[in-house]
Image (tube, rainbow, N blue to C red):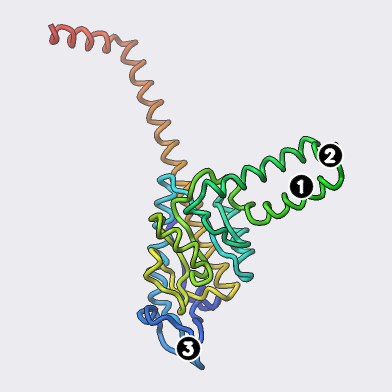
Amino acid sequence: MPFEITMRELLEAGVHFGHQTRRWNPKMAPYIFTKRNGIHIIDLAKTIPLFKIAWEFVRDEVANGATILFVGTKKQAQAAIEEQAQRCGAYYINERWLGGLLTNFQTVKKSIEKLKKLERMEAEGAFDILPKKEVVKLKKKKEKLEKYLKGIKDMERVPDIIYVVDTVREEIAVKEAKKLGIPVVAIADTNSDPDLIDYPIPGNDDAIKAINLITTKIADAVLEGKSLRESEAKGGEELEDVEKEMLERAKEQGIIEEENEKTNKEEK
């Protein structure tokens, strides 16, 4: 499935609406079409090809086995980040960025292990035999950890890519990714610094419809990449089966033995 998006889809979702002109980053000037009523209008003719590049990058990297983390903690992004990450099997953070999540992942991993331990205790009935006060305390701790870590519970290592909604708000996440050389795919609104984004998608990172549209497309790219990876793996298995079949047939026909005898004579 190739990348598909129309100008009409982007317009209907309000992807072209930027911030107030006084709240802009001059580095975004190449992606601005004009200004209307004190608001910058993003040039969607620039958005579409850059969106395609970002989409294809995600698809190709995932096809090669890359993992991706969706990040968006602002209210307008939380639902889309969770829904679309779950739909495509990506990791996600949609409540609060935990400082050091990337640069100090081993510490975060300890918190994940604590959460899993508490979940096991509850599932195995340990909470039923503990004093009530302690159970209340443990449940509160579990709820807090679940709130912030639910989207990365199964993340064993730092992701290969991060997709970000609002790089200004998620500045720490972007800086951590840059420090580790993790590519950043992100919506670049008119107040963003595009230099911090490896694969910018010029667009509105405040409107729910715009966030939903772009995030859904990125999730589609992840699913397409996974589909390609599965097809390649299946193709490899089928090729192995064909090779085995050819060898078996060659043995039956005595061709392999003849080849081995010829090789032995040449070696002598």
Residue 22 marker:
3
Query: Neighbour class for label 2 at 10 Å: few (<14), some, many (≥20)?
Result: few
- Residue at point 39% right, 78% down? 28
Dot 1 and dot 2 residues touching (CB under 8 Å): yes
Query: Neighbour class for label 3 at 10 Å: few (<14), some, many (≥20)?
Result: few
x then y, percent, for residue 237: 42, 31
Q: Amino acid at mark 3?
A: Arg
Dot 3 and dot 2 residues touching (CB under 8 Å): no
Q: Earlier in the sequence, mark 1 or mark 2?
A: 2
Depth check: give the residue in front, 27 or 59.
27
Q: Amino acid at mark 1?
A: Leu
Residue 138 marker:
1
User: Which element type, helix, strand or loop, lies under badge 3?
Assistant: helix
Q: Earlier in the sequence, mark 1 or mark 3?
A: 3
Q: CA distance from mark 3 to mark 2?
A: 58 Å
Q: Earlier in the sequence, mark 3 or mark 2?
A: 3
- Residue at point 36% right, 15% down? 248
Q: Is residue 15 above or below residue 61?
A: below
Residue 130 marker:
2
User: Which element type, helix, strand or loop, lies under badge 2?
Assistant: loop
Q: CA distance from mark 1 to mark 3?
A: 48 Å
